[in-house]
Image: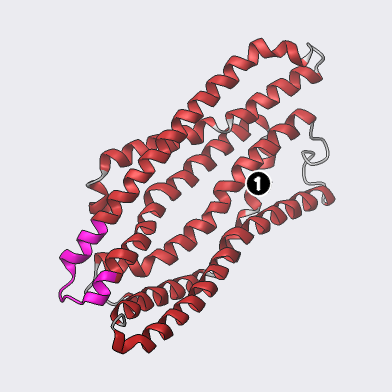
Amino acid sequence: MLKLLMRLRWPLAGLLASLGCTAALSPAFAWLSKQVVQRVEAGETEPWNLLPEFLPLFLLICVGLFVAEFGEKMLSKVMEFRLIIALQRSYLERRQLANAPQDVAQVLYGSDVAKKGFQVIYQDSWKIITVTASVLLWQLSIGPEWIPLLLASIAPTALFVWFFGARIQRGSREILDLQSKITEATGNEQRSHLHAHQERLFHVNLRFHVVKWLAEDASDVVMWLAFAVAVAVGYWLHIGNSVRGISLAELSALVVNLRLLVKPLGDIGRVYTRWREAYPALLRSLTPEHKADAA
């Protein structure tokens, strides 16, 4: 996988730089909101009088984010298309015996699924690391006592997502096998087999996406509940004075940072499910001589 990624090192470097810039600039809004609220709370000036001081900085952050996010979108598409081509070539070069149904299914469907495994390495993991580190560093300057509560919500979410991992990989492998069987049964004399495989694929896909939804979207709810429980426990047990004595400025900054932090931490579940989904197709693309079931 690393050898293949090295062939795409220049667009990859640009994509990682864009992701890093987005991660570094996004939490700046939390710092900016805290500064504004603190000035207003102190009674220094009317909110509208702060515009000449803070508006240029706000616009500069917005422009920087726009450029970084545009670069991320474009370079992400470049990497996605080039990866599919590289995986198609890898499979056809490495497979020992031609098998038309499996070859067609792997080239047209399997390579598209396999690319998600690469995206986990070069995009999703990098985004989680940079955004989480950036938010936590900004939070250190705003309210470091909240960091343990922010991190306490990770473990329950990780356990919730891990529970569905094997089921997702098994469903992905079954879908890949059914794609080959459908391709093989396209002749008129095998029409009954084709219809049976199509119906089976429909039910497997439905079950697969239900499990994926539970592992990905429902994990966000688990994370918010875990954070709420951590705050409640801190309040009831009088752990520190941050829960009871938070100021309006700190609360506004915390809400912005929490919203930023929940996304990359919630993406941990999505990255895990994406890897388990991609693994069977990835194994067939890079080592077609081995059965994906060996995973």
Q: Which residue is mark 1?
A: 150
Counting the numbered discs, the total is 1
Evaluate whether residue 163 shows in this view.
no
Nearest the camera: 137 or 222? Answer: 222
- Give left or right: position of 126 versus 155: left
Q: On the rendered image, what quadrant is the N terminus found in?
A: bottom left
**Residue 186 falls in which quadrant of the image?**
bottom left
Q: Position of residue 33 (x, y in %)?
A: 68, 26
- Give left or right: position of 268 versus 45: left
Q: Is residue 19 above or below residue 98?
A: above
Q: Look at the magenta stretch and give its main secondary structure.
A: helix
Instruction: Please tell me whether residue 103 belongs to the stretch shown in magenta.
Output: yes
Q: Position of residue 44 (x, y in %)?
A: 79, 11
Question: Quick one: SS at disc 1?
Answer: helix
Please name the residue shown 35% across and 55% down the image.
118
Q: Residues within 10 Å of mark 1 (few under 14, many from 20)?
A: many
Q: Is residue 213 above or below residue 80?
A: below
Please name the residue shown 67% across and 57% down the image.
221
Please name the residue shown 34% across and 36% down the image.
14
Evaluate whether residue 36 shows in this view.
yes
Give the magenta-colored segment's residue range: 86-104
Instruction: Please tell me whether residue 244 belongs to the stretch shown in magenta.
Output: no
Q: On the rendered image, what quadrant is the C terminus found in?
A: bottom left
